[in-house]
Amino acid sequence: MEGIEALVFDVFGTVVDWHGSVCAELKDLGQNLALNADWDAFATEWRKGYLTNTSRIAREGAGSGPLNVDVLHRQILDDMLSSPRWAPVGSKLDEQTRAHLNLVWHRLNGSYSTKSGLYQLKKHVILTTLSNGNVRLLVDMAKHANLPWDLVLSAELFSCYKPNPEAYLGAIKHLSVPPEKCAMVAAHIYDLRAAAAVGMKTVYVQRPGEAPENVVVKPSSEGGEVDVVVQSFVELASLFSETH
């Protein structure tokens, strides 16, 4: 991490616990409406729809789908609630309830030790998001989870989704630092590969459930493809304490 001036963070899955946060709110909704459903499966399917669609739009370009994640999440939600599996849930959710539920992604809680690690890192480097989440979502989430970003960048600002290289190049441009002085921090190897392809350094943070089964990510010092592997942001901050 020597020479790094800015850390660029993926958010969903890397910084915040999307699965636990969404499941908790779904369970509360189910209790309030006397609905019984597999809320874990519901949250997982919603997230899978997000990953599938953002990947497709990143590949096919603007015009192939909405570039605002709130709009995309709502499309996926409505499609799910009209499907045979989730129609019994959909029949109980009016427009106001659906609109509120759709914004659950603005109310995600930080993963373990996220906040303390970020506050330690903030003493040493610039901290910014680079997420497929839209700007308002990221701002609301930062306020909800007390995330101390210096800057909020979204792929929405660059009219694309990650892993389109324009997202990473756009972040580098606005940070006014060369790519080798920026490090992408993510729990997803595809994100780090795309960042490395434009010259950024890469930090893989291990998060349960975010990596495909049997995938082991190693640092370059051990023959792997990323620069650094850490278990937490606190561990990452300790590396900066050693080099700054």
Image (cartoon, rainbow, N blue to C red):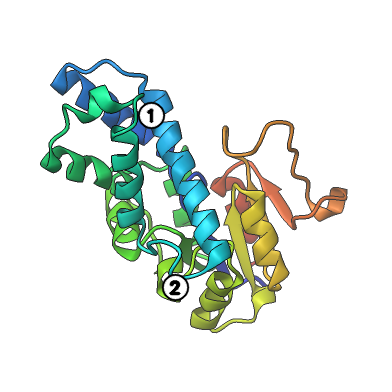
Residue 226 numbered mark, or none: none
- Answer with mark 1 or mark 2, whichever residue precedes in sequence: 1
Residue beneath disc 1: 42
- At x 61%, y 48%, the residue is 188
Question: Which label was assigned to residue 159?
Answer: 2
- Three-letter amino acid code of the residue under disc 1: Phe
Q: Is mark 2 on a helix, strand or loop?
A: loop
Q: Answer few, some or many: residues within 10 Å of disc 2's Cα (few below 14, many 20 plus, some between 14 and 19).
A: some
Residue 223 is situated, as x and y percent measured from the top left of the image, at 88, 50
Where the N terminus falls, by quadrant? bottom right
Q: Residue at x 31, y 18 (%)?
A: 37
Which residue is more in the foreground, 124 or 134?
A: 134
Element on which disc 1 rests:
helix
User: Given the current orientation, which residue lies at the most extreme right position?
Assistant: 223
Left or right: residue 25 versus residue 192 is left
The 10 Å Cα crowd at callout 1, few under 14, some 14 to 19, many 20 or more, is some
Residue 167 is situated, as x and y percent measured from the top left of the image, at: 53, 70
User: Along the line of sight, which residue is nearer the eye, 226 or 236?
Assistant: 226
Which amino acid, mark 2?
Ser
